[in-house]
Amino acid sequence: MSVKITALQAENVKRIKAVELTPAENGLTVIGGKNAQGKTSVLDSIAWALGGDRFRPSQPQREESVIPPNIKVTLSNGLIVERSGKNSSLKVIDPSGNRGGQQLLNSFIEQLALDLPRFMGMNGKDKANTLLKIIGIGDQLYVLDRKEAELYNERLAIGRIADQKKATAKELPFFDGIPEEPVSASELIRQQQDILARNGENARKRERKEELAKELRSVMDKLNELTQRRDKLEADYEIACRDAVDLHDESTEELENNIREIDALNAKIRTNAVHAAAEREAKQYGDQYDALTGQIEDLRAQRLALLDGADMPLPGLSVEQGELTYQGQAWDNMSAAEQLRVATAIIRKLNPECGFVLMDKLEQMDLDTLREFGAWLESEGLQAIATRVSTGDECSIIIEDGTVKDTPAEPVKPTWQKGAF
């Protein structure tokens, strides 16, 4: 069972002359009044009594008084805590009459419950670290966040390189219908020489034909005498004619053009090769980027599973990118009521034995928000003692000139539905 404050008596503390307070067991007890009347002094008295010298005011004694401060706090576990006398000595008495000291109080009093502004004033990361510490996943989440940051930075660098490679490949010219490998000039020359050799052989065969024809004409007059010679020559001539019919000279024009254009051709081939290499590199870096994206998404899934499985002090509370969030909103985007709700839940989780929290300056809440916040406190079984610059009906007591004004109302009894927020 968490410990609550059941009664407070304070005299001559800061602006307080004499104040008695019986806070509501659960929900919100509002200490109202105008400025500089002693409202905050009531909270300071409780914090000093229970928290020790670190909460001692720099000028604890009321200026107009010659009597030292006197504070008595009664707790729901039966302990009675007193600070009194010139040295404001501490006395803690349990129901059996045994005495204790500050160490006994520290065992169940959460320091942040006495000093809520200290938590509220933490930066986002410190708030998040406080939460992660109490739910026991801080180290695991730190490892995942660090790994995600490393992968994110690596992916960012890879993505930039991939974009550069794509841009380079896009800017490079590309020639269609060009071979992938550079062309050799010596090969083209060899092909040209082969054609020239075959053409030379054709020329010799043509010359042979002409020689035979000439010889045939020279012996025609001797035909009668040289019949056998004529027959042979005619036969040779016929053979030579047949050979000449099937001969076709090959053109070397294309090869000659290719030889002349080989440098330009090879330049285009090299350009295409550079273009292809740039596209391959861009694809490789793109693949690396996609792989890193997958790893980052996997880490984020692990992180989400870790947070989903954690025993959060408040539904909707989480840690994103090292910052405390509630309902998806960072601390500076939360309303004042949401900030108090989150802070109270975390402080309660820090030390479940401490069932109360002190709050100052609740005038930042309108009445509806104040009632909703009180309803949530009740639903959680929490006690909050708070101050508010107001003299309205929402106040449990009114402090005026260091004392409780005439007939304070009963501790505020909310008319809202319990647990609704």
Image: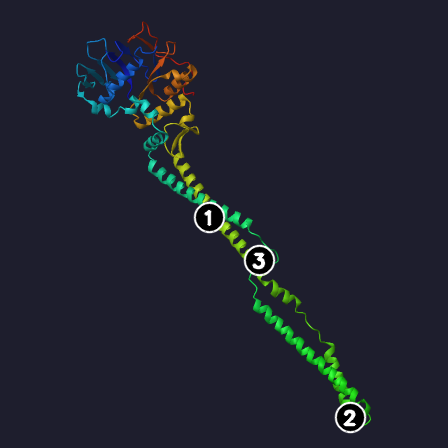
The local secondary structure at tag 2 comes to: helix
Quadrant containing the C terminus in the rendered view: top left
Residue 228's tag is 2
Q: Is residue 330 visible?
A: yes
Q: Earlier in the sequence, mark 1 or mark 2?
A: 2
Real-space Cα distance between discs 1 and 3? 30 Å
Q: What amino acid is at disc 3?
A: Lys
Give the percent coordinates (x, y) of residue 33. Answer: 34, 10
Cβ atoms at labels 2 and 3 below 8 Å apart: no
Real-space Cα distance between discs 2 and 3? 67 Å
Q: Is residue 1 visible?
A: no
Query: Which residue sits furthest bottom?
Result: 225
Give the percent coordinates (x, y) of residue 169. Answer: 54, 50
Residue 57's tag is none
The local secondary structure at tag 3 comes to: helix
Query: Mark 1 or mark 2: which is in front?
Result: 2
Query: Mark 1 or mark 3: which is in front?
Result: 3
Quadrant containing the N terminus in the rendered view: top left
Answer above or below: position of 272 versus 409.
below
Q: What amino acid is at disc 1?
A: Gln
Task: Give the residue drawn at x 50%, y 46%.
Answer: 163
Location of residue 418 by image quarter? top left
Give the percent coordinates (x, y) of residue 28. Answer: 35, 16
Give the percent coordinates (x, y) of residue 334. Answer: 42, 25
Cβ atoms at labels 1 and 3 below 8 Å apart: no
Q: Earlier in the sequence, mark 1 or mark 3?
A: 3
Residue 288's tag is 1
Seen from the viewer's position, the closer of residues 160 and 184 is 184
Residue 268's tag is 3
Task: Give the residue drawn at x 65%, y 76%.
Answer: 198
The local secondary structure at tag 1 comes to: helix
Task: Give the residue drawn at x 54%, y 53%.
Answer: 275
